[in-house]
Image (cartoon, rainbow, N blue to C red):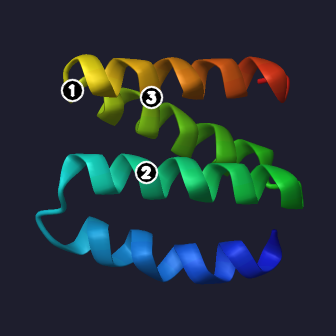
Amino acid sequence: PAEAVKALEPELDWLDAGQADPAAAARAQFALARALAATGARARARTLAEAARAGFTTLGPPGHSRAQEVVRWLARVGF
C-alpha cells in the first residue's frame, strides 16, 4: 500500500493541477483512497473516496455504478 501511495500521489497532483478528465480524477482518487486506508490514513482516505464518489456521479449511468462501488467500499471498511 505504501508503494501505491507513492505512485498515486503525483498522478493525483498532476490531475488536480490541470483540467483533468473527471473520470480519470475519480479513478485516481478512489485508488489512492484505498491505498491510504490500507496504510491507516483513514481521514484522508475517506475524503478522497467521497470526492471520487461525487466525481463518478457526474458521469451518468456508467459513473453511477462506480459511485455505488465507492459507497460499498466505504461501508466495508467502516467509514
Q: Is residue 24 above or below residue 59?
A: below
Residue 39, quarter of the rendered image: bottom right
- The label on residue 58 is 1
Circle 3: residue type: Arg
Q: Quadrant of residue 16?
A: bottom left
> What kind of element bears circle 3?
helix
User: What residue lies at 58% left-to-right and 55% top-to-bottom?
Assistant: 31
Q: Is residue 6 left or right of residue 61?
A: right
Identify the residue at horizontal 25%, vertical 17% (top origin). 61
Mark 3 and mark 2: span between their CA atoms?
Answer: 9 Å
| Contact (Cβ within 8 Å) of mark 3 with mark 1 | no
Q: Say which element carries label 2.
A: helix
Upstream in sequence: badge 3 or badge 1: 1
Q: Secondary structure at mark 1?
A: loop
| 57 is higher (above) or lower (below) than 40 | above
Image side of residue 20 versus residue 45, left or right: left
Mark 1: amino acid? Thr
Q: Which residue is mark 3?
A: 66
Q: Residue at x 11, y 64 (%)?
A: 19
Q: Quadrant of the N terminus?
A: bottom right
Q: Quadrant of residue 66?
A: top left
Q: Residues within 10 Å of mark 3 (few under 14, many from 20)?
A: many
Q: 38 left or right of 46? A: right
Which class describes the residues within 10 Å of circle 2: few (<14), some (14-19), or many (20+)?
some
Name the front one of labels 3 and 1: 3
Q: Pointer 2: what residue?
A: 27
In which quadrant will I find the C terminus?
top right
N-terminal of the two: label 3 or label 2?
Answer: 2
- Where 49 sits versus 62, above or below? below
3D distance between C-alphas at marks 3 and 1: 11 Å
How far across and down, in percent of the image, does residue 9 sit? 54, 75
Q: In the image as oriented, which residue stretches furthest toward the left?
A: 19
